[in-house]
Amino acid sequence: MSNIIQTRNLSFSYSGKDKILKDISFEVPRGSVYGFLGPNGAGKTTTIRVLLGLLFAGREKVMIFDKFIEKHKIDIYKKIGALIEQPSLYNHLSAKENLEIVCIYRNMNPDRIPEVLDLVKLPVNSRKKVKAFSTGMKQRLGLAMALLPDPELIILDEPTNGLDPEGIREVRDIIIDLNKKKNITIFLSSHLLSEIEKVCSHVAIINHGHLLFQGTIEHLRASKEANYRVLIETNDIEKAYSLLADKYRMQKSPENLYANLRSKEDVSPLIDLLRSENIIVYQIKNEIESLEDIFITLTKSDSHD
Amino acid sequence: MIKNLKYFISCFDAELLKTRRTFAIWMAVISPLFIALMFFLVYLFEDSILTMLNTGNPWATYIDQHYKAIATFMLPFFVVLLTTLVVYTDHKNNTWKLLYTMPVPKWCIYYSKLFTIAFLVFLTHVLFLLLILFSGFLLGIFRPELGFGDFAPAYLQLVVTTINSFLATLGIITIQFWISMRVKNLFVPLGIGLICIVAGNILILAFFEEIIYIPYAHPSINSWEIIGSRSIHQFFIVNEVGFYGLIYFFIVSFLFYLDVRRMNVK
């Protein structure tokens, strides 16, 4: 068994209206930190709810630990810790009491409570009600709840949402630690590529309910090397743009003009074309795309259809 | 079977822990205290009580008056409020997604909550019973001329009345529980409950026997012991109303569960 989560052509819509998820298939390998990346409203939370069986997307669509979620919920939930959107906390109770509730449902000994509180850096013997917690403390308590059963898989939906930079770093360190030391598989969603890049080994990109990419981070970078992107410096950006736009995928800003070529073999014909219209070329420079650019190009080009 | 029982006990235990320090719990304690205190003060200071009780054993009247006072409105409204509040805890805190990803069956989440509400209403009744006894004994000491000290309390009547009063609330609990599970709001279930209680009490005046199927009228029917134009049937301890309350609680609740089960968890 190498995949912890597996989905097959997952589609979902609320009461037959527009589909929120369209034909999503992906695999989360055991031991990976899997980043689920997409802009807000792309379908990340819906996907997570379907994975957890909170929303029903049809039979034999989602497999976790090699079992279909709709048939083996209880067995699967025993080995999963999850944090979906805002943490689910009882505001009128203390942190310890919230964790006790989870212990009771999971039929666990409450011995582990101080350990997980310590792990997320919350005071063990505080009687403070959750109501009085800051957003960061609530998020960390939510994380503690997910960690309580010593799970094999942790599913986190936007775990750094609403946290300050310090809080974001702490959560990130906890995630990396859990993965490295305990070999826990982690599935986390985010709309920030910079976050995913720092912690994840694998990434899937979703937009408008479509899966645009899945693979390792290196794979994502490599896949885009086929795209040879150049910066063109000329005396007439407008003219050059209208000339080249028919033939190449172009982008322009007031100062710069970019062309996305298939390879460097395309550079000479491009210069010839510009010269044939008497446009002066000062410089043509290869631009290495950052992951952020890749993400934006992917999600933008998808929004055209 | 044993496994299912274990699941249920865990869920029930967790539900009880969740009610800690909630308004619902305070209400469950304060409501019977308030009523018992009012009666105690009236019996202690009001002169006309003496003429009313001149027939001898005061306990039967004392117990009867307590339960008649709450049956028409206070008790059903208390039940509606308590049910709404207990379910609303999970709406307010957005905890359904936590509950439904715990390794317990779905029916357990539903039934443990329903039983918790019934259990709280039962505890309130037990507290009410004890308070009636206690205040009666105090009256025996502080106003001996009423005769509370001269007679033994009507224990059997007290227990039977308490049990039937509790059973008469089960139908309301079942329906209000379903509405509260469906509506993610505090005021809609309360409003519906309030309207139904008033409607139930008005329909009693129409003297038709089918009123027994309307749970919101159960506490009143139970206290007047009249259904339509006939008197209520008694099976050993439990009366007809209690019997229908149990049917609602154990059978109709299952139909509601089938509806709640297929809801998406948002």
Image: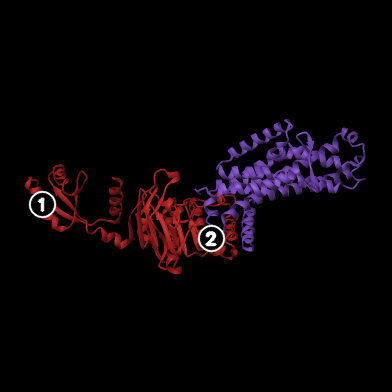
Chain colours: A red, B purple
In the rendered image, is residue B233 in sight? yes
Q: Earlier in the sequence, mark 2 or mark 1?
A: 2
In the displayed structure image, the side of residue B3 where residue A215 appears, left or right: left
Residue B138's x, y, as percent? 85, 45
Of B246 and B20, nearer the camera is: B246
Residue at 85 percent across and 34 percent down: it is: B46
Secondary structure at badge 2 equals: helix
Q: CA distance from mark 2 to mark 1?
A: 64 Å
Residue B218 vertical placement versus B95 (above, below): above
Residue shown at 68% from the left, 49% from the top:
B118
Q: Chain of mark 1?
A: A
Pointer 1 residue = A271
* Left/right of residue B91 with respect to residue B140 in the rendered view: left
- Residue at image x 55%, y 54%? B99
Q: Residue B116, position in %: x, y?
A: 66, 51
Q: Chain of mark 2?
A: A
- Do badges 2 and 1 share one subunit? yes
Residue B154 position, x and y percent, is: 86, 46
Please state the horizontal and vertical placement of residue B252, each as a whole percent of the image.
64, 46
Residue density around tag 2, few if under 14, some if 14–19, many if 20 or more, within 10 Å: some
Q: Nearer the viewer, mark 2 or mark 1?
A: 2
In the figure, is residue A264 to the left or right of B106?
A: left
Residue at x-position 88% and y-position 43%: B142
Badge number at residue A74: 2
Q: Mark 1 belongs to which amino acid?
A: Ile
Do the CB atoms of the residues marked 2 and 1 lie less than 8 Å apart? Answer: no
| Amino acid, disc 2 | Ile
The relative height of residue A289 versus residue B68 in the rendered view (above or below) is: below
Total numbered labels placed on residues in the image: 2
